[in-house]
């Protein structure tokens, strides 16, 4: 996948609003592979909706979303499974981890499907992000910031053309935010991938090609 193309896309719940001031909604917007984008959002502007639309979890929107000029509403379940395994990696704000599994087991759920990372590479990521001692701890016993790092490691355990990160550092300190940024840049360069980050305040420092207001 080389592009994500939004054409006059707008959540249906916004349809009765007289005016929409946004760089994303109701615009012709293309996200390109190999580039980095920051989407700054205020509460209630549809940030979570955008994430769910692009990942194919919801389709309650007007307009069109294309992947390489193919309308995503035409994709079958099988096609979505392939896309989520090989082309699109998503870090959701609510993380979607399994609290009864350990941190490593949560990551392995993804990695077993893709075979993308070796065990030593995964353990290196845990160490780099300061949670090497949490590998065998159940996620339900971790702080939210620690869980964010586990979920982030999971997003890197697959090939992708686009990495979508929804408020990835909302509960991280500056040092861990910086380390996460370095890992994102390195992985994006390796895979020649695009990166899309959302933020309602504190945002991760990356060499963004464009900053948009939702």
Image (spheres, rainbow, N blue to C red):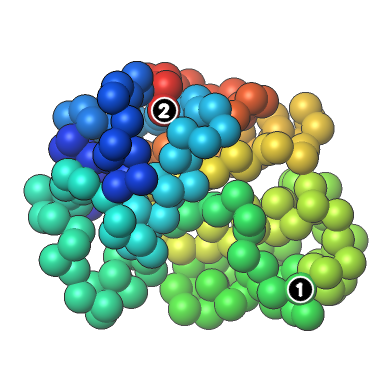
Which is more foreground, mark 1 or mark 2? 2
Q: Position of residue 14 (x, y in %)?
A: 34, 38
Relative to 54, is 127 on the left or the right?
Answer: right
Position of residue 84 relative to residue 193, above or below, is: below
Q: Residue at x 48, y 67 (%)?
A: 116
Q: Position of residue 101 (x, y in %)?
A: 75, 79
Q: Residue at x 14, y 66 (%)?
A: 74
Relative to 44, is 152 on the left or the right?
Answer: right
Q: Which residue is mark 1?
A: 99
Q: Position of residue 32 (x, y in %)?
A: 25, 35
Mark 1 nearby-residue class (10 Å; few <14, some 14–19, many ≥20): some
Q: Camera-side residue: 47 or 166?
A: 47
Query: To which quarter of the image does residue 204 belong?
Result: top right
- Residue at disc 2, secondary structure: loop
Q: Which residue is mark 2?
A: 214
Query: If you read the primary sequence from the N terminus, does the residue marked by circle 1 or circle 2 appear first?
Result: 1
Position of residue 22 relative to residue 130, above or below, is: above
Query: To which quarter of the image does residue 176 belong?
Result: top right
Decide if residue 87 is in sight here: no
Q: Position of residue 92 (x, y in %)?
A: 55, 53
Q: Camera-side residue: 210 or 135?
A: 210
Q: Residue at x 27, y 39 (%)?
A: 15
Relative to 193, is 167 on the left or the right?
Answer: right
Marks 1 and 2, how far apart at CA: 32 Å
Q: Residue at x 77, y 27 (%)?
A: 174
Number of numbered labels in the structure image: 2
């Amino acid at each position: 996948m080389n592009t994500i193309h939004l054409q006059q896309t707008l959540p249906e719940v916004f349809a009765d609003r007289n005016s929409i001031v946004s760089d994303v909604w109701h615009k012709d917007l293309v996200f390109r592979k190999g580039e980095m984008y920051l989407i700054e959002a205020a509460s209630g502007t549809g940030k979570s909706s955008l994430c769910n639309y692009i990942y194919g979890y919801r389709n309650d929107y007007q307009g069109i979303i294309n992947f390489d000029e193919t309308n995503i509403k035409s994709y079958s379940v099988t096609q979505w499974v392939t896309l989520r395994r090989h082309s699109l990696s998503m870090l959701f704000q609510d993380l979607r981890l399994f609290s009864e599994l350990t941190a490593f087991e949560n990551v392995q759920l993804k990695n077993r499907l893709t075979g993308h990372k070796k065990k030593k590479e995964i353990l290196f990521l845990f160490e780099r992000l300061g949670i090497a001692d949490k590998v065998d701890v159940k996620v339900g016993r971790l702080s939210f910031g620690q869980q964010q790092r586990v979920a982030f490691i999971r997003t890197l355990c697959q090939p992708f053309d686009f990495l979508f990160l929804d408020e990835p550092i909302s509960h991280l300190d500056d040092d861990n935010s910086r380390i996460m940024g370095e890992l994102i840049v390195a992985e994006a360069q390796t895979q020649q991938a695009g990166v899309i980050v959302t933020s309602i305040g504190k945002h991760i420092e990356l060499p963004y090609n464009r900053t948009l207001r939702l």
